[in-house]
């Protein structure tokens, strides 16, 4: 399905260099999430922007994984399964894990990628990236700072910088400390008291909401404050059309097989 990507003609907010359509964790559900294989499949479906989750290994290497623990999306040796918190292990151990066979036999042996691996793929192919910071609990500020510092170095001189987002305020504070010039976005699963003021205080460029939270009122508030508006995770045609009609700027989807990105 192809949807209209037009934006309101009278929009005085700062220039937004990103496409509307964003592939969730690489290729949604068509491939093992947060792997290079997923990015390749998302790209084959015409996507030119991707969302991924990044955390730190015990020795400070930024790598892609959503969960705090290893159990759901990797097949690990028994020694790692005994202590399954991903961030407790050095990259030398994490790099040996199978991050594909949980999804399907076709992806067996797919490794966990580092942020550097993903940066290389995106930069060489002209793709944009939304990096969601997923800290191991208790390391929010440190993770934000290290991930942003690495991202600023990896994308140095690039035409379009990655968008750094997180649900964790401390992680975004750390990201600002590490690389103040990178654009940031506050992720929200509820419009809690002070959400707009918090995003302003963090120096965010965007607000990324559960798509059901956007309505005429919340859109007007966020736009009036100068923010760009993104939504997750949008997998139905009616929901995508509603967000486009509301004038939002970005749609994160698992359904790379359903939505054909007109702005690729």
Image (tube, rainbow, N blue to C red):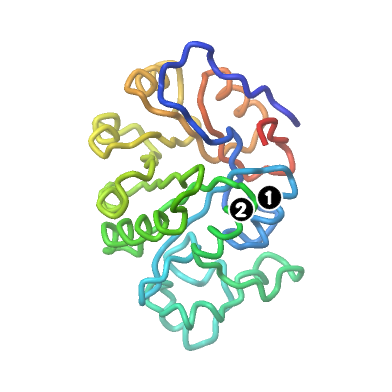
Q: Nearer the viewer, residue 77 or 42?
A: 42
Q: Secondary structure at mark 1?
A: helix
Q: Residues within 10 Å of mark 2 (few under 14, many from 20)?
A: many
Q: Earlier in the sequence, mark 1 or mark 2?
A: 2
Looking at the image, residue 152 lies above or below residue 217:
below
Q: CA distance from mark 1 to mark 2?
A: 6 Å
The reply to whether callout 1 and callout 2 are in contact (CB within 8 Å) is yes
Q: Seen in the image, is 263 located left or right of residue 92?
A: right
Q: Position of residue 251 (x, y in %)?
A: 56, 35
Looking at the image, residue 165 lies above or below residue 40:
above
Q: Secondary structure at mark 2?
A: helix
> Which numbered dot is residue 19?
none
Q: Position of residue 250 (x, y in %)?
A: 53, 33
Q: Considering the image in quadrants, where does the C terminus appear?
A: top right
Residue at 65% x, 51% y is 125
Residue at 50% x, 63% y is 64
Q: Considering the image in quadrants, where does the N terminus appear?
A: top right
> Which numbered dot is residue 42?
1
Q: Seen in the image, is 169 located left or right of residue 154?
A: left
Residue at 67% x, 65% y is 103
Number of callouts in the render? 2
In the image as oriented, which residue stretches furthest toward the front?
157
Q: Nearer the viewer, residue 235 or 264?
A: 264
Residue 149, quarter of the rendered image: bottom left
In the image as oriented, which residue stretches furthest toward the top?
10
Q: Position of residue 255 (x, y in %)?
A: 67, 42
Q: Position of residue 184 (x, y in %)?
A: 37, 42
Q: Seen in the image, is 23 located left or right of residue 231?
A: right
Q: Which residue is mark 2?
A: 26
Q: Nearer the viewer, residue 212 or 220?
A: 220
Residue 4, quarter of the rendered image: top right
Q: Seen in the image, is 140 located left or right of residue 39?
A: left
């Amino acid at each position: 399905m192809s949807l209209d990507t037009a934006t309101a003609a009278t929009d005085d907010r700062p220039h937004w260099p990103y496409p509307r359509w964003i592939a969730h964790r690489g290729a949604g559900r068509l491939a093992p999430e947060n792997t290079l294989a997923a990015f390749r499949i998302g790209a084959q479906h015409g996507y030119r922007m991707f969302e991924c989750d990044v955390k730190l290994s015990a020795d400070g290497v930024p790598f892609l994984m959503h969960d705090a623990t290893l159990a759901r999306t990797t097949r690990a040796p028994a020694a790692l399964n005994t202590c399954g918190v991903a961030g407790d292990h050095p990259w030398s151990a994490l790099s040996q894990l199978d991050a594909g066979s949980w999804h399907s036999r076709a992806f067996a042996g797919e490794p966990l990628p580092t942020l550097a691996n993903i940066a290389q793929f995106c930069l060489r192919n002209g793709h944009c990236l939304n990096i969601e910071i997923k800290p191991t609990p208790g390391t929010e500020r440190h993770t934000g700072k290290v991930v942003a510092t690495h991202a600023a170095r990896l994308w140095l001189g690039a035409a379009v910088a990655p968008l750094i987002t997180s649900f964790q305020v401390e992680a975004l504070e750390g990201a600002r400390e590490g690389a103040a010039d990178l654009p940031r976005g506050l992720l929200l699963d509820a419009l809690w008291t002070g959400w707009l003021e918090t995003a302003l205080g963090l120096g965010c460029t965007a607000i990324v909401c559960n798509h059901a939270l956007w309505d005429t009122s919340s859109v007007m508030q966020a736009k009036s404050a100068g923010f760009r508006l993104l939504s997750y995770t949008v997998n139905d045609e009616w929901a995508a059309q509603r967000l486009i009609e509301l004038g939002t700027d970005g749609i994160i989807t698992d359904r790379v097989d359903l939505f054909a990105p007109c702005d690729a």
